[in-house]
Image (cartoon, rainbow, N blue to C red):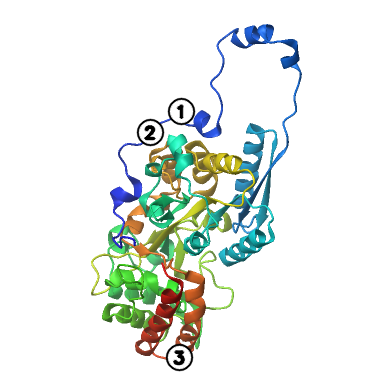
């Protein structure tokens, strides 16, 4: 069973004990350069037969992912760059991508490929289904590989990611892209124009009342139509309630993860507040075509990973991120957080190559080049946050600064049999979204259905 404790800032990033430069050669498997004259001497002494030119057998690496290029230019640049760089370092290797829309799409695709006996070597694996794949023995334990490569040792990566990749005392993934946190996006220009203070001194300490005050002040209605949405009040789901219940002192699961627990008084109170935002305060429905990027939505749920995307769509947008507000039973504003993994499949015909690929992608130089330089996105390595590349990116885009603090005060993503749990509870959430059930009725029903899933599938 797993510990249910929150992630401390020290645990997330582990600021002490990091290593500096000189990682690239080890990460890429490059040998140290020969001393002057050494290579020439070796050639002279080598027998003629051994001097014959040899051609390495071609090797194929198949990687599956739901980060589909085309949705954002940076994603295309990222995957093209990884492929080009890795193939230049390994001329006998061809990297082949299989992109599938959505995490559930990847889950279904890989399951089908493995059943058919086709090749798949690595994938980004969501916390939403890593447990399911572990229970099906899809993934290779990485401990023997990590023991041979200290740069990939578990303590090099954020503890929030290591929470999700441990099973029966073994490690099955390299923490990647995180800590990722659902945050509140704030249009700071519009808030300032309305006479509100959008600084973090306020928004990183706000409560439910202050949140409503801010959203109402920038909300605009033209007759019966909303012309500018103060806050985009989305619907209910397990993930949708997580960001609200944690800052009110509630939890999704019991400490041993075997049962749901969000029907507590604190959880139901958070659900009612969420419902009041939509119905009592009128933050919906969303105007057609309204987005955070085009400034028709002032306050909106965003991802800590979305900075590069937002700037790519509207480079002049003035915005910041904040946690979800603290409820009366909470101790701090917060949200829901997770860290996905890069994993190696047990069916890989060339696991050593797959490990070299995973090690390269998650090495410090690669993350600095692409996560700091291209994606403007949190990475899973501790030392990344001290690198010149990341610090320069934060100086350029201050919205990135200290987002790990929000993760630190957040609870874990609903990771236990996510797909099955979502399917089982969806009728209840639909009824609640359609006002056919109240929060007080819906939450206990959803808990009962989710508990049936957890009891059947196990942890």
Residue 19, numbered circle: 2
Q: Looking at the image, is mark 2 or mark 3 earlier in the sequence?
A: 2
Q: Residues within 10 Å of mark 2 (few under 14, many from 20)?
A: few
Instruction: Decide if residue 152 is in sight here.
Output: yes
Q: Is residue 281 left or right of residue 94?
A: left
Q: Please determine whether, in this image, residue 71 is positioned above or below residue 280.
A: above
Q: Residue at x 39, y 83 (%)?
A: 448
Q: Is residue 348 left or right of residue 94?
A: left
Instruction: Decide if residue 214 is in sight here.
Output: no
Where residue 355 sits, quadrant-wise, is: top right
Q: Residues within 10 Å of mark 3 (few under 14, many from 20)?
A: few
| Rendering coords of residue 349 (x, y %) | 64, 46
| Rendering coords of residue 286 (x, y %) | 52, 78
Q: Please determine whether, in this image, residue 141 is positioned above or below residue 388.
A: below
Q: CA distance from mark 1 to mark 3?
A: 59 Å
Q: Are marks 1 and 3 in contact (CB under 8 Å)?
A: no
Q: Is residue 10 left or right of residue 38?
A: left
Q: Residues within 10 Å of mark 1 (few under 14, many from 20)?
A: few
Q: Are marks 2 and 1 in contact (CB under 8 Å)?
A: yes
Q: Depth check: 444 or 224 in front?
A: 444
């Amino acid at each position: 069973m797993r510990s249910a404790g929150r992630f401390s800032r020290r645990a997330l990033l582990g600021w002490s004990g990091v290593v500096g430069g000189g990682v690239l050669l080890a990460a890429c498997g490059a040998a140290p350069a020969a001393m002057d004259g050494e290579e020439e001497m070796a050639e002279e002494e080598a027998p003629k037969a051994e001097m014959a030119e040899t051609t390495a057998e071609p090797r194929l690496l198949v990687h599956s992912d739901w980060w589909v290029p085309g949705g954002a230019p940076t994603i295309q640049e990222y995957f093209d760059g990884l492929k080009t760089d890795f193939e230049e370092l390994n001329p006998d290797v061809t990297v082949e991508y299989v992109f599938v829309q959505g995490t559930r799409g990847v889950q279904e695709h890989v399951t089908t490929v493995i059943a058919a006996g086709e090749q798949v070597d690595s994938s980004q694996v969501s916390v939403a289904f890593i447990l399911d794949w572990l229970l099906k023995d899809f993934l290779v334990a990485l401990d023997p590989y990590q023991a041979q490569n200290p740069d990939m040792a578990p303590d090099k990566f954020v503890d929030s990611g290591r929470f999700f990749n441990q099973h029966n005392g073994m490690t099955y993934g390299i923490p990647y892209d995180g800590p990722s946190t659902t945050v509140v996006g704030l249009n700071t220009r519009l808030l300032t124009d309305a006479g509100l203070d959008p600084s973090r001194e306020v928004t990183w300490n706000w409560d439910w009342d202050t949140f409503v005050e801010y959203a109402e002040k920038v909300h605009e209605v033209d007759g019966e139509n909303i012309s500018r949405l103060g806050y985009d009040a989305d619907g209910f789901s397990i993930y949708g309630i997580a960001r609200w219940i944690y800052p009110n002192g509630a939890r999704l699961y019991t400490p041993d993860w075997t049962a749901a627990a969000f029907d507590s008084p604190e959880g139901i109170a958070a659900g009612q507040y969420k419902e009041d935002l939509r119905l009592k305060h009128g933050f919906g429905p969303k105007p057609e075509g309204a987005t955070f990027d085009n400034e028709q939505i002032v306050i909106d749920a965003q991802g800590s990973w979305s900075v590069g995307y937002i700037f790519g769509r509207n480079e002049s947008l003035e915005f910041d991120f904040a946690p979800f507000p603290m409820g009366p039973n909470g101790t701090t504003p917060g949200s829901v957080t997770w860290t996905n993994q890069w994993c190696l499949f047990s069916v890989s015909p060339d696991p050593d190559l797959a490990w070299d690929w995973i090690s390269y992608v998650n090495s410090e130089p690669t993350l600095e080049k692409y996560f700091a330089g291209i994606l403007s996105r949190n990475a899973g390595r501790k030392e990344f946050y001290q690198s010149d590349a990341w610090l320069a990116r934060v100086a350029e885009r201050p919205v990135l600064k200290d987002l790990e603090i929000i993760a630190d005060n957040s609870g874990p993503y609903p990771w236990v049999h996510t797909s099955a749990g979502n399917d089982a509870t969806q009728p209840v959430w639909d009824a609640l979204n359609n006002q056919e059930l109240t929060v007080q009725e819906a939450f206990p029903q959803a808990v009962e259905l989710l508990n049936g899933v957890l009891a059947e599938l196990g942890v």
